[in-house]
Amino acid sequence: MGKIAQLPHRGAVAVTGEDRLVFLQGLVSADMREAAPGRALWSALLTPQGKWLHEFFVFDGGDRLVLECERDRASDLAQRLARFRLRAKVSVEDISPGIVVAAGWDGAAVPAGLAAADPRLPEAGWRGVFPADAAPEPNAEWTAWDAHRLALGLPDGSRDLEPDRTLLLEAWFDALGGISWTKGCYMGQELTARTRYRGLVRRRLFPVRVEGPLPPPGTPVMAGEAEVGTIRSGRDGRALAMLRTEALRERLRCGEAVLVPERPHWMAEAEASAT
């Protein structure tokens, strides 16, 4: 039987009004013209300088677009988007209270409602946003989902990315379908495109096997005496770490643990296609 978990650290922002698609199209990294019922998009909001601020899944709810995001940062996302309304006929609201975000994997069927396959990887399963009284019954703890996405190497908001610092290509948004290269301008697009075309990615988020006690997030990763990155989220002997790419062949230590970088199949495929 497939696994379903409710994700208490995730919430949602609703964008309503007749200009909602055009409004978001000029702000976020995914192509909003691809939004459709039964399909989710993965996207990001950047600073004008191209640094990451928020990641979210976009669901088409008919008369509104629902952005599934970090619950603790949903109000910040709503406020940032609302600053750009100007004369656009849109309304932006944090709807996290009263909703449940759920994820299913290992063959769990996509339920009815505002749910769709996770657009990043087939192995990631599905995501959904539900009213509290209509959420699918969980049969797994959210920590089981967390271990699954760590094994896949998928980032989870600010647990893994640093607001106003991380670049989208450092977090594999290009390989995971979170960037449209054909939609035209959006906030932060210029630096994102320049990073791609000039090959300026000097660090990346990698899954690592942790041999020893799991260090706290933000602990420096060392290769000899040189600091080459930081560890981000982790559990059960696995974690994600932002690492300088030239350090991957070095012996890496973090706190009292040794880190062994891994490349899931999708990372290897993305790197091969870029050469």
Image (tube, rainbow, N blue to C red):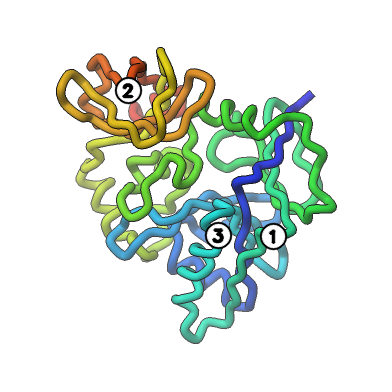
User: For residue 244, what is the image quadrant?
Assistant: top left
Report, in whole angstroms, how far the alpha carbon at label 1 lies from the one at label 2. 38 Å
In the image, is 253 to the left or to the right of 71? left
Q: Earlier along the polypeptide chain: callout 2 or callout 3? A: 3
**Horizontal and vertical percent position of residue 100:** 72, 50
Secondary structure found at label 3:
helix
Q: Are marks 1 and 2 in contact (CB under 8 Å)?
A: no
Instruction: Rate crowding at label 2 as few (under 14), some (14 to 19) or many (20 or more) other CA atoms within 10 Å.
Output: some
Tell me the residue at 48%/18% (across/down): 237
Q: Locate residue 174, reporting x and y percent.
A: 40, 43
Q: Residue at x 31, y 23 (%)?
A: 254
Which one is earlier in the sequence, the residue at label 3 or at label 1? 3
Q: Nearer the viewer, mark 1 or mark 2?
A: 2
User: Mark 3 — residue?
Assistant: 74
Q: Which mark is residue 97?
A: 1
Is residue 74 in sight in this rendering? yes
- 86 vs 180, nearest the viewer: 86
Q: How many marks are shown on the rendered structure?
A: 3
User: What quarter of the picture does the C terminus occupy?
Assistant: top left
Q: Which amino acid does the dot numbered 3 rest on?
A: Ala
Q: CA distance from mark 3 to mark 1?
A: 10 Å
The residue that label 2 is drawn on is 255
On the rendered structure, is 178 left or right of 16?
left
Q: Which residue is depicted at the point 37% across and 34% down? A: 205
Judged from the image, the secondary structure of the residue bearing numbered disc 2 is loop
> Residue at (43%, 50%) from the top-left corner?
179
- Between the residue at mark 2 and the residue at mark 3, the CA separation in whole angstroms equals 32 Å
- Horizontal side, residue 166 vs residue 125: left or right: left
Specify the farthest residue to the right: 133
